[in-house]
Image (cartoon, grey):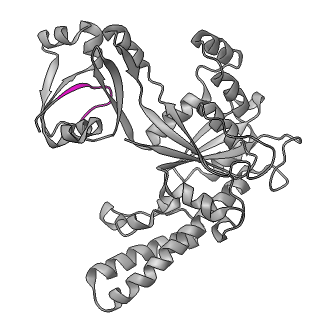
């Protein structure tokens, strides 16, 4: 699965610094708006200790972790929905991603210019929200105009679609995000072709000063209060420290560095894991002498769908899946030993793949 999270925020909140820490790609970080004009894409490994366990047991030629793509999208400004700054381009970039990582400045530093003249996380959040909502409202209203004529002529499907669109319009007009609309999966089909921006799930990243990386600060508390009804995740980081951690290649050095700040793992690892969780993803593994590999799927997928992530032929010609649980693999050490102990199950098309399953697919095309 190709998954993308778009990093958004006002200029000078630490977006590009965060992106640089997340990936090997180096976006230009500068103390002025629009230093990032085109979106930069970084491919990031999903941290997973289970891969290391399997590597030790199998001793493969290579190990391939699951990945997520992070897109550094240039800073939005007030009026972006009307084309201010590079608004249309930025909003178009956001439309293409699966989830939004909203970076918000939660630190004071007189040497770093704030686009609005003062630090205010809630106000910053609302600027971004408003621009996305206005663009979504424009999209919904355009479709309503097309659907209304058919609805008035008595078309039952169009009438239902118009009613659903009206609910989204009302919510957006109240300054709320489209994801807050309660709708069935069938009703959501009315907006599928609109690719609404505020439907996308969001993680708020609070970029704080060094003294606040453990417990946060008043700015973080203000933001938490503002988003308490959004069912949103919040991750606290210091982007500058994360950049330093990312440059360390030795794992022991990283642990020592993290310990100096009272951290057990980097904020980036927490962000990557939160992104994975936000998108409702799970991981299964394939393990052989050629490679041990993590594969990304949606939670709840059945075996044929999971097989299709490897190759479409695996899904089309699916026969069965041979499944070993990680705990059993750890206990019995090898696939053969697991099979002899009766710990390899043979599953059919209705098997729901579980996070951590070690799988081998049988197929015929």
How would you classify the magenta stretch by its main secondary structure? Answer: loop
Answer with the quarter of the image where residue 310 lies. Answer: top left
The magenta segment is: 352-361
Q: Position of residue 213 (x, y in %)?
A: 70, 30
Say which residue appears at 37% left-offset and 8% top-offset. 56
Left/right placement of residue 360 relative to residue 210 reads left
Q: Position of residue 170 (x, y in %)?
A: 51, 74
Left/right placement of residue 98 relative to residue 365 reads right
Q: Position of residue 46 (x, y in %)?
A: 47, 29
Is 10 in front, or is 214? 10
Is 123 in front, or is 81? 81
Say which residue appears at 25% left-offset and 34% top-offset. 353
Picture layout, residue 138 above or below residue 188 = below
Left/right placement of residue 207 relative to residue 178 reads right
Any part of residue 238 in sight: no
Is 356 in front, or is 65? 65
């Amino acid at each position: 699965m190709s998954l993308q999270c778009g990093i958004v925020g006002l200029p000078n909140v630490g977006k590009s610094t965060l992106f640089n820490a997340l990936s090997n790609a180096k976006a230009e970080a500068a103390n002025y708006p629009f230093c990032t004009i085109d979106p930069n894409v970084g491919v990031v490994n999903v941290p997973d200790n289970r891969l290391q366990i399997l590597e030790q047991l199998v001793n493969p030629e290579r190990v391939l972790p699951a990945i997520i793509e992070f897109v550094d999208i240039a800073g939005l400004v007030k009026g972006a929905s009307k084309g201010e700054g590079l608004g249309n381009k930025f909003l178009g970039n956001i439309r293409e991603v699966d989830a939004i990582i909203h970076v918000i400045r939660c630190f004071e530093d007189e040497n770093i210019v704030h686009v609005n003249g003062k630090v205010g996380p809630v106000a910053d959040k609302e600027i971004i929200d408003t621009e996305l909502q206005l663009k979504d409202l424009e999209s919904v209203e355009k479709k309503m105009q097309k659907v209304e004529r058919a609805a008035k002529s008595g078309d039952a499907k169009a009438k239902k679609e118009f009613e659903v669109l009206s609910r989204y319009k009302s919510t957006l007009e109240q300054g709320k995000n489209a994801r807050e609309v309660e709708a069935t999966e069938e009703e959501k089909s009315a907006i599928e072709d609109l690719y609404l921006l505020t439907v996308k799930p969001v993680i708020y990243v609070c970029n704080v000063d060094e003294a606040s990386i453990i417990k946060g600060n008043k700015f973080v508390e203000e933001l938490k209060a503002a988003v308490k009804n959004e069912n949103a995740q919040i991750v606290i980081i210091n982007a500058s420290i994360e950049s330093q951690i990312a440059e360390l290649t030795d794992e022991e050095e990283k642990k020592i560095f993290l310990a100096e700040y009272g951290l057990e793992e980097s904020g980036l690892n927490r962000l990557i894991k939160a992104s994975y969780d936000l998108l409702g993803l799970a991981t299964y593994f394939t393990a052989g002498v050629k490679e041990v590999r993590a594969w990304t799927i949606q939670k709840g997928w059945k075996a044929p769908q999971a097989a299709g992530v490897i190759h479409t032929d695996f899904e089309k010609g699916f026969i069965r899946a041979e499944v070993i649980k990680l705990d059993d693999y750890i206990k019995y050490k090898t696939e053969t030993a697991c099979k002899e102990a009766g710990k390899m199950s043979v599953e059919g098309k209705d098997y729901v793949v579980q996070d951590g399953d070690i799988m081998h697919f049988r197929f015929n095309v």
